[in-house]
Amino acid sequence: MVVLRSFVIMVIVEPILEGRLRNRSWPYGLAGVAVVGSGLYVLGLITTVLAATSRTALPLSVDPSLPASALPRPLLGLIMVMLIGIVALVQSAGLHGPWWLRLLSLAVTEIVIGIWGLHVTGFGPARLLFVPVVLIMIGMLVLVIIRAGRSYAWWEFPLVLVLVGAAIISGVLQDSFGVAPLGFDLARTSLLETLSLLGVLAVPALFAAGTAVAELTVRASVSAGKLLQRIAGRRVLYPILGVVAAARLAKLVYDFSRWDRVEIAAPTIISSVVVMIALAAALLMIDRIAVHDRQRDDHEELADLSEHASRTAFPIGVGLVAVQLPLTIAVFGLTIVIALDPQGRIGWLNTALIARISSPDVVRALRAVVGAVVLAVAIRSARRGNRRIAMLLGATAILLGAGLLALVPGLGQEDGFNLSVFDLVAGAGILITIIALAVARRLTRERAAVLTVAVVLSGLVASRDFISDPVGAVLGYSGVGLALFGLTWDLLTGSAWANTAGRRIGIPSRVMLLFANSVFGLLVVAFGAMARVVPAAIPDSGQWASLGDWLVGTALVATVLAALIEALRDGRLPR
C-alpha cells in the first residue's frame, strides 16, 4: 500500500499540486471570477456527459440542410450559458491587456453579440429588441476605451457578464416572437455560425489536450522505475525485468500476428523507418549541439519533461492555425465570388482552385513549414542549454514534416509514419539490448531499472489510449474522450502560468483567459458530443486532440526513450 500510495502521489498528486491555480494575493473579486469559471467548466462537463442520453430522450433541433447534426434542444440553453460566460471572461481579460488583446477580445465580443442579438425577426414591439443590442455593442467599445491602462476592478466582470447576457437573451426573445413559432430555431443557427467563425480559437487548446495521455504514460513509467530502483533489491529487480520483457515479447508477437498487411505494407514500413532514422538523427544532432555549446546544465527531471508537452503543443497549435488561416480566408472569399457569378463563368474555381488549395498535400506542406520553425526553435533552445526540451521540440519538428513522405511516389502512408512499426522496432531493439547486456554480464541493477522503464514505455507507444478510450465509452462517443480528458488534465496541472504576472498581461487577465480557453475548448467538445456529425467549418475536437497526441505525444515518448538509452551509459535512471 505504501508503494501504491507513493506511485499515485508521484503520478497524479504532485503534478496537480505543482500546476494548479493558486490564490496568491488576488485582487478583490478575482476569486469570484475563478468560481464562475470553474462552474462553467463543470457545466460543460455535465453537458458533455449528458449528450449521448439527451439525443435519445430529449427533442432535437434539426436543420434541414444538416439533418445529421441535430442537437438536443434543452441542452442549447446550457451551451448558451457557457457562451455568455466565455465572452464575458474574454472581454474582461482584454480590458487590461496589450493593444492586440483589447482588439481581439472586443472583436470576439462584438461578433458573438452580433450573431446572436441582431435578429430583426419579431413582430410588433419585439422588432425593437435589436436596439438595446446595438447600444450594448457601442457600450462595449466605450468600456474598452475608458478602462484601457487602468487597474483591475471587481465590478468589471459582473458588468460585462450582464451586458453580454442581455444582448444574447434579447436575440433569443426576438426569435421567440418571430420565426420560432414557424418552426425555425435560430439559436441553433447562431451557435453554428459562432463556432464556424470563432471555433478555430479553440484549436490550440484541443491540440494541447491531446498530449495528456502521453504525459501520464511517461510520468507513470518513469515514476514506477524510480520506485522500483528505490525499493527493489537485486534478487527482485532482475525477475521483474524478466517478467516485463517476456510480456513485451508476447505483445510484440501478438501485435505482429494481427498486422493488417494491406494497411502496413512495404511502403508504410519504409516511410516509417525513414522517419525513425530522421528522429534519431535530429535527437542526436540536438544533443550534440547542447553538449558542445551548453551555457547551463539541464536540471529538468525526466518525469517533469511531460509537463512541457502541453506547453509546447499550445504554440504549435497556434502555428498550425496561423498557416492554414490564409487558405481558409481564400476558400471563403472564392466561395463568395462564385456565388456572385450567376452565369457560372468562373465556376471552374469551385472544382479546381478551391479543391487544390484545401487538398491534403497542401496541408502537409504547411505542417512542414511549422516543423521547420519548430526545428529552428529547438536548435536555439539547445544552444541555451535546455537540452531535453530542445530534443522534444526537435522530435516534434520531424513528425510535423513526416507527412511530406506521402508526396514521394510509392510511399502512400498518409502521415509518413505508423505507430505499429515504431512499436515493433522500439520493442525489439530494447529486448535485444537486454539480451546483449545480460550475455556481456553488464546488466547491473541500475541498468535493469532503466530497461524496465524502457520496456514498459515502449509497450505503451501504440496503446496509450487506455485512458481516453474508457472515457469515450462512458460518454457513448469515442471521438471526444481524448479531448475531454486532456482539457480537464491541463486545467488541473497546467494552470501555473496564471499564477504570475507577465510584462504586459497581469494575473487577473491571465486567470480569466485560462478559464475562457478551457471552457471554450470544452464547449467545442460538448458540441461534438451532441451533434456527432460536426460540420466541416467547425473544428472536430477529437481530430485535433488526436493530432496533438500523434505529433507531440509521440515526440515526447521518443524523447524519453532516447534519454533512457543514453542513461544506459551512465548505468543509472535519469532524474
Image (spheres, rainbow, N blue to C red):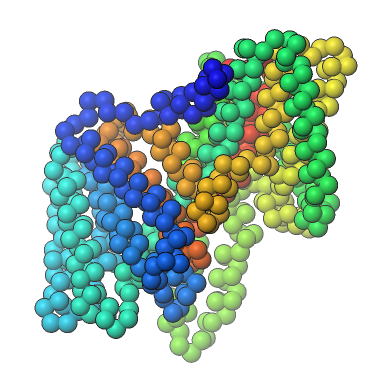
Given residues 497 and 224, the one toward you in this image is: 224
* Residue occupying image coordinates x 20% and y 52%: 161
Given residues 20 and 536, the one toward you in this image is: 20
Q: Position of residue 340 (x, y in %)?
A: 42, 82
Residue 283 figure quarter: top right
Q: Position of residue 403 (x, y in %)?
A: 67, 51
- Quarter of the image with the N terminus is top right
Is residue 456 visible in the rendered image? The answer is yes
* Residue occupying image coordinates x 26% and y 40%: 35
Q: Please determine whether, in this image, residue 90 is positioned above or below residue 238.
A: below
Is residue 369 visible in the rendered image? The answer is no
Q: Please determine whether, in this image, residue 570 is positioned above or below residue 555.
A: above
Given residues 402 and 253, the one toward you in this image is: 253
Q: Position of residue 276 (x, y in %)?
A: 73, 39
* Residue occupying image coordinates x 13% and y 63%: 135
Q: Is residue 242 left or right of residue 189?
A: right
Residue 153 figure quarter: top left
Q: Is residue 242 left or right of residue 488?
A: right
